[in-house]
Amino acid sequence: MLHVVSVTSVAPPTITWRCPRCPCSEFVCSERFRMNTNAKLTDIWLIYRCTRCDATKNLTIVERKPIAKIRRSLVDAATTNDPVAARRFARDLNLLRSAGVQVLRGDRFSLSQTVPNASRLQLHFAEPLLVRVDHVLGVALGVSHRHLRALDASGRLRLHPPTPLSRLRLTTTTDVSIDPDESGP
């Protein structure tokens, strides 16, 4: 029997950046933009906040570009502080790398259900999330990471599309099959 587990983001990924005000280095996406436009050029930033002291870090999305050359949807998103667009940028690994920051933690998520002892399940993501599949799968099945690694090493765990279990990556729908084997972990 196929169990469908819906995965929803509770909070976007956090980044690591040395805070100029306190010893903390964890910044969370505020899901807000800052836009500055003078007569000819526009800058757009995604705003992050220190989890401890609320200091801000602006991540450059557009730098010194004529507003006519910026996608209208991006200008609208920045103007209205569209949280969906903000989360999409917060998960853009190329943007984060070019800004010189690293992801500290992937999306925090919630599941529609847990399915212990399931042999087939589908992880369905409401929007692409930056997560480790082993973390989501462990919570969904109610098993430890050690148990998942043992299933993977034994060839009893199959993911479609094939996905590295322990790598933080942008994930959409993943189908999982687990071959039953009573002698396994």
Image (tube, rainbow, N blue to C red):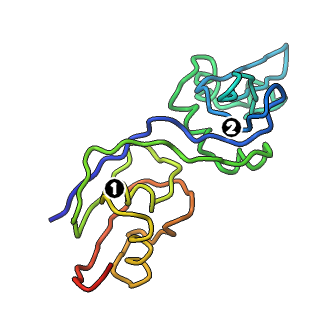
Give the spatial CA distance, label 1 vs label 2: 28 Å
Residue 126 on image: x %, y %: 37, 43
Location of residue 75 (image quadrant)? top right
For the point 79% across and 28% down, the residue is 22
Where residue 134 is drawn, which disc sits there?
none
Above or below for 73 versus 127:
above
The image quarter in which residue 52 lies: top right
- Side of 116 where 123 appears, left or right: right
Q: Residue 177, percent across and down?
A: 29, 72
Residue wearing tag 1: 123
Q: Is disc 2 surrounded by few (<14), some (14 to 19) or many (20+) residues within 10 Å?
A: some
Tag 1–tag 2 contact (CB < 8 Å): no
User: Could you tell which of marks 1 and 2 lies nearer the N-terminus?
Assistant: 2
Circle 2: residue type: Glu
Q: Secondary structure at mark 2?
A: strand
Q: Which residue is mark 2?
A: 26
